[in-house]
Amino acid sequence: MSHPPLLPRRAGAGFKPQHFSLIAQEPQPLGFFEIHAENYMGTGGQPHAELQHIRTHYALSIHGVGLSIGAPHPLDQDHLARLKHLCQRYEPHAVSEHLAWSSHGGVFFNDLLPLPYTEETLGIVAAHIDELQTVLRRQILIENPATYIRFAQSAIPEAEFIGEVVQRTGCALLLDINNIHVSAINHGTDPLTDILRFPLDRAQEIHLAGHAESHDGTSPLLIDSHGAAVADPVFALYERVIEEAGPIPTLIEWDNDVPEWPRLLEEALAAQAILDNHQEQCAISATAA
Amino acid sequence: MFAPVQNDFAEALFDPERAVPEDILACHAEAAGKRFAVYRNNVIVSLLDALAARFKVTQQIAGDAFFKAMARMFIAAHPPTSPLMMFYGEAFPDFISTFAPAAEIPYLADIARLEAARTRAYHAADAAPLDPAALQSVTPDDLPYLHFHLHPSLEIVSSAYPVVTIWAMHEGLIPLGPITDWHGEDALVVRPHLDVDIRRLPPGAAAFLQRLSEGKSLAEAAECAAANHQDFDLAIHLAGLFSTGLVTALSIAASEDMPK
């Protein structure tokens, strides 16, 4: 398994075509951009012209949302081939997918759906990640999901499940801190306790995004909407993770109600400030020692 | 076992009447239904959004509420089978043409056909249009045997309604107003560079382009077009081929050994 150059340990942003002309106007103070793989699985045209420009000037993360790694049935070989082709074409610095399923019985649901955490699903997920890494001939990153329900049959805590997947397959972790916060609130657990159980030393990328606040009649219900600024408690968790694990490439995801480019950039720079602050603190303590 | 639970989960996603699958828990038992509804909502909203993004003018013409109701029925009958959401809705135009409540807007299905073609052209393979100067290297003797390789993004949408005019009005390309000259139009859809070009073809051009794209020679295509349209002017159509960036290569051959 090869290890191509990694993403820089800086802040990045999810690339949106409506921002392209502003992004292309001048160098942006960001370490990388991320795209959803499926949006670039057409043959040619504007999407590839823009992605080529992005790839020429920045590090690139390709984030798959459609492979359905968590489903019990075999991976879609056509889709796997498309992903391989995309990776060969752009040689990204990171390739990631989700701990979730999105296809069943030939239907694609276009959502990241949850799975129970059991010995059985551990075997399924690990085999699918092995297959993906073998086909792509590289290490991939797996992202923890935001969930609204749990399964009675789940026997393994999520962080442990992912820790075991990472151990068995040698894949890395894409730590979505908003997802951890959303899931923790939805399931009545403590986000900080949960997050510290994840294999943070294997995190090669962090996702930060906004969520929506709702209520299910009994308790608060957070929705992973990617449609708002990163919430304060999520930024606080992020600071704690960076303190714990050191600087990690950090992406701001904003996929719905997408703001103008300067606003998205500002959000990414807020993450960059936390990374910079950590570096300064380390430098100060090194000098003091 | 996960498989039976996943099966229940998947079936309940598209069926709001169906009970929340067993095995699903919320942190409070009574909240499981509301929690599961988040997934139901995410799925349907994301698919409605995908159709609305691809069929923007269709939605404008139908109105939001009508479009949404029609799209929901389409999703139930034709859920996506591929993760490439930009191409979701290939069967939507045909669905609209058989959707009885849409019969009041007889051109709606053809507008959807035009928008579906537009997305395919947007994502089609790249190819550089040929400079018309290339024609100068063709000798008069070879002219009848000339074959045009047309752009991979090319599509023609023929309609009994003025679809290009209606589409352009809703896109804000021409002023919205009554269409006095109500007749069928053939739409040319092509993406010679990065932008998709949609324009109304002059009479005879659709048949001419159709023959050329089937690999017929210039002489055969022109003959066929002239047979159907008395005023077919080859010089004008030849110029149009190049001005729209439709030609990507030339070759000279008798039709039976037409190069691929």
Image (spheres, rainbow, N blue to C red):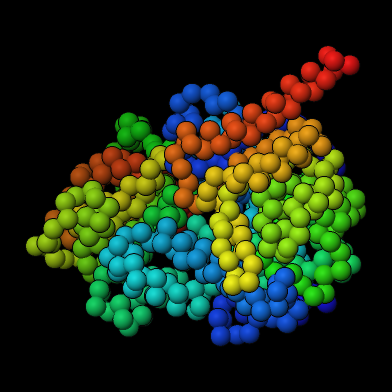
Answer with left or right where residue A245 lies relative to residue B21.
right
Q: Residue B257 location in percent, x, y? A: 48, 53
Residue at point 72%, 58% (across, down): A184
Residue B97 in sight here: yes
Q: Residue A249 location in percent, x, y? A: 71, 35
Residues A251 and B113: in front is: A251
Residues B218 and A281: in front is: A281
Residues B139 and A237: in front is: A237
User: In the displayed image of the protein, which residue is found farthest to the front?
Assistant: A218
Q: Quadrant of residue B57?
A: bottom left
Residue A124 in sight here: no
Q: Residue B1 location in percent, x, y? A: 83, 77
Residues A20 and A91: in front is: A20
Q: Quadrant of residue B224?
A: bottom left
Answer with left or right where residue A147 lies relative to residue B156.
right
Residue at point 56%, 36% (across, down): A267
